């Protein structure tokens, strides 16, 4: 099954106008509105993929539901602890194996896709949907709806710090290097994709920096800059369980390391970079979203 044809950058940024913040959830409860839930308190590339993918793959107006009292798509991110009995889960994952909603919620919600095997393992005993749903982070679908144009390689290495890592001395050290670009997550996802596409290699402490690099075939390495990432390795292992990087925990660990060695570390990053390919059929993730939307 083919996704919609590529759209240009201006048109895609215009998709952000599909986001509505109206008076209350009940006031927009019509079939023409698709209710979604994801973390949207601060701009973040991974979270904002929800809006772009859902508004592009189907033609309904996307409304971010706050309460969870009406049927809604629970989308991309480590947000399954936000689930309610009305959630239609599409590619979500747990942040850890301990932060979960009640078993009553987990058994009642509808599951159309999960991020990976680790999330699935926590659900199979509670919800039979988990046994038969496709696995994968829907961020891997982005190349199907957006292809950067007129992009050339400008930097040897791009560094994508997690929001929690932006104050790391390593970020400052890399920023001073001539052939290195720092790419922040608080920007439009398509501009972010353009920027990583201008780099030969990417190193990221953010999961979606790695996912989008894999999706656009940019060799990448996971960075560990601090102990501030909630859930530790869980979400990374969950994503990699659906890729050729299965069980990948290797990374360039810069915690407690001397940032004056940034030049040496940049070479280490490049030498360890790989592309982790998705193991399954992308069209199943697409079909899962369409099925989830049809029931809302």
Image: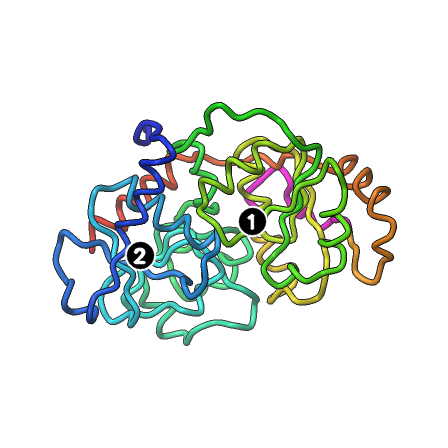
Question: Is residue 59 placed above or below 147 in the rendered structure?
Answer: below
Q: Is residue 96 magenta?
A: no
Quarter of the image with the N terminus is: top left
Q: Which mark is drawn over residue 229?
A: none
Q: Position of residue 240 (x, y in %)?
A: 60, 46
Question: Is residue 123 placed above or below 59 in the rendered structure?
Answer: below
Residue stretch rendered in magenta on the structure: 241-252
Q: Which one is nearer the viewer's eye here, 221 or 249?
A: 221
Question: Is residue 198 placed above or below 203 in the rendered structure?
Answer: above
Q: Residues within 10 Å of mark 1 (few under 14, many from 20)?
A: many
Q: Which one is nearer the viewer's eye here, 285 or 49?
A: 49
Q: Is residue 242 magenta?
A: yes
Q: Which mark is drawn over residue 239?
A: 1
Question: Is residue 166 placed above or below 145 in the rendered structure?
Answer: below
Occupied quadrant, residue 28: bottom left
Q: Which element carries disc 1, helix, strand or loop?
A: helix
Q: Which one is nearer the viewer's eye here, 220 or 44?
A: 44
Residue visible at 76% across and 42% down?
177
Q: Which element carries disc 2, helix, strand or loop?
A: strand
Q: How many marks?
A: 2
Q: Is residue 294 left or right of residue 284?
A: left
Q: Is residue 8 among the parts visible in the rendering?
A: yes
Residue visible at 63% across and 64% down?
229
Q: Position of residue 62 (x, y in %)?
A: 25, 53
Q: Position of residue 190 (x, y in %)?
A: 44, 40
Q: Which one is nearer the viewer's eye here, 5 or 258?
A: 258
Q: Is residue 184 left or right of residue 250?
A: left
Q: Which mark is drawn over residue 73?
A: 2
Q: Is residue 131 among the parts visible in the rendering?
A: no
Q: Position of residue 57 (x, y in %)?
A: 29, 39
């Amino acid at each position: 099954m083919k996704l919609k044809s590529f759209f240009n950058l201006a048109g895609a940024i215009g998709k952000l106008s599909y986001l509505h913040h109206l008076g209350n959830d009940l006031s927009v409860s019509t079939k023409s509105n698709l209710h979604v839930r994801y973390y949207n308190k601060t701009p973040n590339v991974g979270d904002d993929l929800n809006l772009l993918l859902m508004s592009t793959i189907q033609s309904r107006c996307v409304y971010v539901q706050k309460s969870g009292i009406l049927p809604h798509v629970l989308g991309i991110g480590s947000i399954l602890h936000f689930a309610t009995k009305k959630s239609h889960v599409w590619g979500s994952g747990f942040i850890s194996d301990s932060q979960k909603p009640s078993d009553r919620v987990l058994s009642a919600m509808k599951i159309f896709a999960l991020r990976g095997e680790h999330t699935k393992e926590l659900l199979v005993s509670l919800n039979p949907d988990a046994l038969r749903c496709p696995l994968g982070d829907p961020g891997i679908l982005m190349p199907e709806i957006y292809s950067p144009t007129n992009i050339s390689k400008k930097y040897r290495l791009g560094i994508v710090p997690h929001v929690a890592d932006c104050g790391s001395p390593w970020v400052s050290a890399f920023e001073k290097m001539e052939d290195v670009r720092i790419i922040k997550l608080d920007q439009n996802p398509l501009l972010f994709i353009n920027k990583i596409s201008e780099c030969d290699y990417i190193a990221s402490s953010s999961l979606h920096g790695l996912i989008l690099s894999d999706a656009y075939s940019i060799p990448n390495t996971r960075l560990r800059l601090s102990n501030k990432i909630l859930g530790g390795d869980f979400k990374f292992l969950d994503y990699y369980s659906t890729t050729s990087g299965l069980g990948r925990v290797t990374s360039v660990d810069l915690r407690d390391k001397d940032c004056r060695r940034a030049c040496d570390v940049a070479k280490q990053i490049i030498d360890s970079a790989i592309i982790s390919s998705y193991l399954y059929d992308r069209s199943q993730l697409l079909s899962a979203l369409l099925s989830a939307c049809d029931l809302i």
